[in-house]
Image (cartoon, helix red, strand yellow):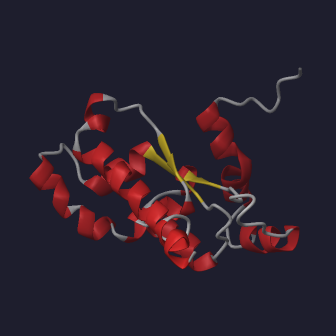
């Protein structure tokens, strides 16, 4: 059972997803489709923490920009229930709040209301909290909360 967990939700899923996202970038997908947006869970499936390293692939792949620039402009990043302020600080150091989206990863991660509220307090402003908690997702998916059914 441990091997299965390691190969899937424990670690392997995240590595496989990061590699798939990198392949989209390195094969020039976003040069051909500059408006394409991809959502990555789990704080970017480790990509946000390896941007310095993967930027070296930009030149080898003949990209117009750095890998990190494509990640900042074409990817949205969700928390997947990993409400760690250190992860938020790092994410904000390599991308902007308008690329971050709240998510819970139900049924695997089930943060309580208190945990969510505590995490949201780590944003500097109410506007940033609103962006993260709902406005960014609404914009990405074309949801108009003011529309009446």
**In which quadrant will I find the N terminus?**
bottom right
Q: Up-down: is 128 above or below 137?
A: below
Closer to the camera in the image, 54 or 17? 17
Q: Up-down: is 149 above or below 19?
A: above
Q: Can you give x and y, in whole percent of width and height, for residue 93 in the image?
A: 45, 69
Closer to the camera in the image, 1 or 27? 1
**In which quadrant will I find the C terminus?**
top right
User: Which residue: 63% across, 33% down?
Assistant: 141
Q: Can you give x and y, in whole percent of width and height, for residue 18 in the image?
A: 39, 58
Closer to the camera in the image, 100 or 21? 21
Q: Can you give x and y, in whole percent of width and height, for residue 110 in the image?
A: 78, 66
**Where, by quadrant of the figure, is residue 46 drawn?**
bottom left
Tally of numbered discs: 0
Instruction: Tell me: 2 left or right of 94.
Output: right
User: Which residue: 36% across, 50% down?
Assistant: 20
Instruction: Tell me: 23 left or right of 63.
Output: right
User: Which residue: 40% across, 71% down?
Assistant: 49
User: Which residue: 80% across, 74% down?
Assistant: 115
Instruction: Tell me: 84 left or right of 126.
Output: left
Q: Residue furthest top?
A: 149
């Amino acid at each position: 059972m441990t091997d299965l967990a390691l190969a899937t939700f424990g670690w392997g899923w995240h590595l496989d997803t990061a590699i798939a996202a990198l392949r989209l970038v390195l094969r020039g997908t976003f040069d051909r489709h500059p408006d394409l947006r991809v959502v990555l869970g789990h704080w970017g499936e480790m990509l946000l923490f390896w941007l310095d390293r993967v930027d070296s692939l930009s030149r080898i792949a003949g990209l117009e920009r750095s890998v990190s620039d494509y990640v900042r402009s074409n990817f949205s990043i969700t928390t997947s229930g990993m409400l760690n302020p250190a992860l938020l600080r790092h994410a904000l150091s390599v991308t902007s709040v308008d690329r971050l989206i709240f998510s819970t990863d139900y049924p695997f991660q089930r943060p309580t209301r208190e945990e969510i509220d505590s995490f949201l307090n780590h944003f500097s402003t109410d506007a940033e909290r609103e962006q993260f908690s709902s406005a960014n997702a609404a914009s990405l998916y074309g949801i108009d909360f003011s529309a009446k059914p």
